[in-house]
Image (cartoon, rainbow, N blue to C red):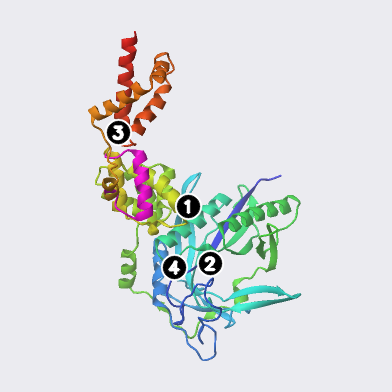
């Protein structure tokens, strides 16, 4: 019986974060909070005699994505009517791009357990979103409610080639693309609000074959978990069919979240089913050289390039570099803190404190890095105080907690509370002698060979110093004093 290889391509629909819709001046609103059908006009409702106008900012955002994906930009592209009838499509057609899209032939760098690789991008094109249906069952009756607030919102469709061959690669592609859209500032990435939706084209073939198997399309997946589970299920389902000698049918499927199975929705459409033809009310979209170059110059460093730079420039591990570059705001904060430390704090130490202490607070309080009550310079000042020995690590954690609570600068907290670390050898020696004199039984146990008692004695010295003594200096003074007492006892 042959072994089978999955072949997967993804279509990703991402709403663009413009203030107004794709072809009219209606505002783009949050579907989770706005009253239904309040951001609708004659154009996005599909009234006769209305004319669409292209949203320039949406085109610019689309260009940012296409350039970031190394696509070939078509400086002339055409909008078309994609005809189908559904309750959430008020015009009876969707304005999209078909034969001549905005961009083609790009690539996205993904990182998996097998290393980095490029996934080919087939096309990137602009279109408008549909409305939203809510299916209701009440008093034994079933009906659907239509909200047109989303109808006409700018939508970017990004279509990959069938270059993915595992669920791991599917997740890596989806998460990396979401990361890129957030880096570019064109999409919030808030999947709970449906601003990114996935459609997976899945087929299987015998290992070693160059022929593509019959594919199915899994529609409207709005979470990474749904994407992973549906693709994994469909791979297994198709392999079972082929192993029994059956034939996979080409169709459109949905994902039943409750039953964890794919379910047929309709026979798979082909392009001719939509009766595409050029949109007569819109001229060709023309991108001149100057506009294209302005967009190109505005692009930030790509997340995969930043990941490599963090590893090389700051000596970070794969894990740390991955976490720090996952969100642009986090990467920006880290680099600002490293720069503000002026070489006095190792980059690895900045990463450790950020990924442990700061991330813990953010997770506990449900905050993002942009909601911290202090900036990267204040964070760097705290780490500089710890690294130079002005305060010890435990005190540093307490100062950071105060910074979270009040937003005060660490230097002000340290001075106001008298937390500056004491490294004076005479003072530390005095504390050590006081502790040893006060606890002769513990000293005797140490001298009798129970050397672990030194840790308890160390704690007593730090308590006497109210945590302000330099721990390394205390440890050295304590060991030297005990050695002297051992020599006397001998």
User: Left or right: where does residue 292 sit relative to residue 133?
Assistant: left
Residue 470: mark: 3
For the stretch drawn in magenta, the main secondary structure is helix
Marks 3 and 1, Cα distance to the nearest angstrom?
31 Å
Between marks 2 and 1 in the image, the one whose residue lies nearer the viewer: 1
Give the labeled residue for mark 1.
Answer: 364
Magenta region: which residues?
390-411
For residue 13, above or below residue 419: below
For residue 379, above or below residue 215: above
Badge 2 vs badge 4, beta-carbon distance below 8 Å: no
State the SS at label 1: helix
Marks 2 and 1, Cα distance to the nearest angstrom?
23 Å
Q: Quadrant of residue 300?
A: bottom left
State the SS at label 2: helix
Depth order, front residue of 277/326: 326
Q: Residues within 10 Å of mark 3 (few under 14, many from 20)?
A: many
Between marks 2 and 4 in the image, the one whose residue lies nearer the viewer: 2
The residue that appears at 29% across and 42% down in the rendered structure is 419
Q: Tell me which label, 2 or 1, sits earlier in the chain.
A: 2
């Amino acid at each position: 019986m042959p072994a089978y290889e999955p072949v997967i391509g993804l279509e990703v629909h991402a709403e663009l974060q413009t203030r107004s819709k794709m072809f009219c001046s209606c505002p783009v609103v949050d579907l989770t909070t706005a009253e239904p059908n309040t951001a609708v006009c004659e154009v996005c409702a599909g009234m006769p005699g209305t004319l669409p106008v292209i949203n320039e900012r949406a085109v610019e955002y689309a260009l940012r994505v296409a350039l970031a994906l190394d696509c070939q930009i078509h400086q002339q592209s055409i909008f078309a009517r994609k005809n189908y009838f559904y309750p959430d499509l008020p015009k009876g057609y969707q304005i999209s791009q078909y034969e001549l899209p905005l961009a083609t032939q790009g690539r996205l760098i993904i990182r998996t357990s097998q290393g980095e690789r490029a996934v080919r991008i087939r096309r990137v094109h602009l279109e408008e979103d549909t409305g939203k249906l809510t299916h209701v069952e009440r008093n034994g009756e079933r009906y659907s409610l239509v909200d047109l607030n989303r109808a006409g919102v700018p939508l970017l469709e990004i279509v990959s080639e069938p270059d993915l061959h595992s669920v791991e690669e599917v997740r890596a592609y989806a998460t990396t693309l979401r990361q890129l859209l957030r880096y570019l500032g064109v999409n919030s990435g808030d999947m709970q609000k449906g601003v990114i939706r996935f459609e997976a084209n899945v087929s299987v073939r015998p290992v070693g074959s160059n022929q593509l198997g019959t594919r199915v399309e899994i529609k409207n997946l709005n979470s990474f978990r749904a994407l992973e589970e549906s693709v994994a299920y469909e791979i297994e389902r198709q392999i079972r069919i082929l192993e029994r000698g059956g034939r996979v049918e080409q169709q459109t499927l949905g994902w039943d979240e409750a039953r964890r199975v794919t379910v047929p929705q309709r026979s798979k459409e082909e392009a001719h089913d939509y009766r595409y033809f050029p949109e007569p009310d819109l001229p060709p979209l023309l991108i001149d050289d100057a506009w294209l170059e302005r967009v190109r110059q505005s692009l930030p460093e790509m997340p995969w390039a930043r990941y490599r730079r963090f590893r090389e420039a700051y000596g970070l591990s794969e894990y740390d570099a991955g976490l720090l570059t996952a969100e642009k705001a986090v990467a920006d904060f880290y680099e600002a803190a490293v720069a503000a430390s002026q070489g006095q704090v190792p980059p690895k130490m900045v990463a450790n404190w950020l990924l442990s202490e700061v991330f813990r607070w953010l997770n506990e309080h449900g905050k993002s890095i942009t909601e911290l009550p202090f900036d990267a310079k204040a964070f760097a000042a705290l780490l500089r105080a710890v690294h130079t020995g002005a305060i010890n690590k435990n005190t540093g954690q307490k100062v950071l907690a105060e910074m979270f609570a009040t937003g005060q600068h660490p230097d002000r907290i340290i001075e106001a509370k008298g937390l500056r670390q004491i490294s004076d050898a005479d003072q530390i020696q005095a504390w050590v002698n006081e502790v040893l004199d006060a606890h002769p039984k513990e000293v005797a146990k140490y001298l009798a060979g129970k050397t672990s008692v030194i840790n308890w004695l160390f704690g007593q010295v730090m308590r006497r110093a109210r945590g302000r003594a330099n721990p390394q200096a205390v440890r050295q003074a304590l060991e030297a004093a005990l050695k002297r007492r051992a020599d006397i006892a001998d």
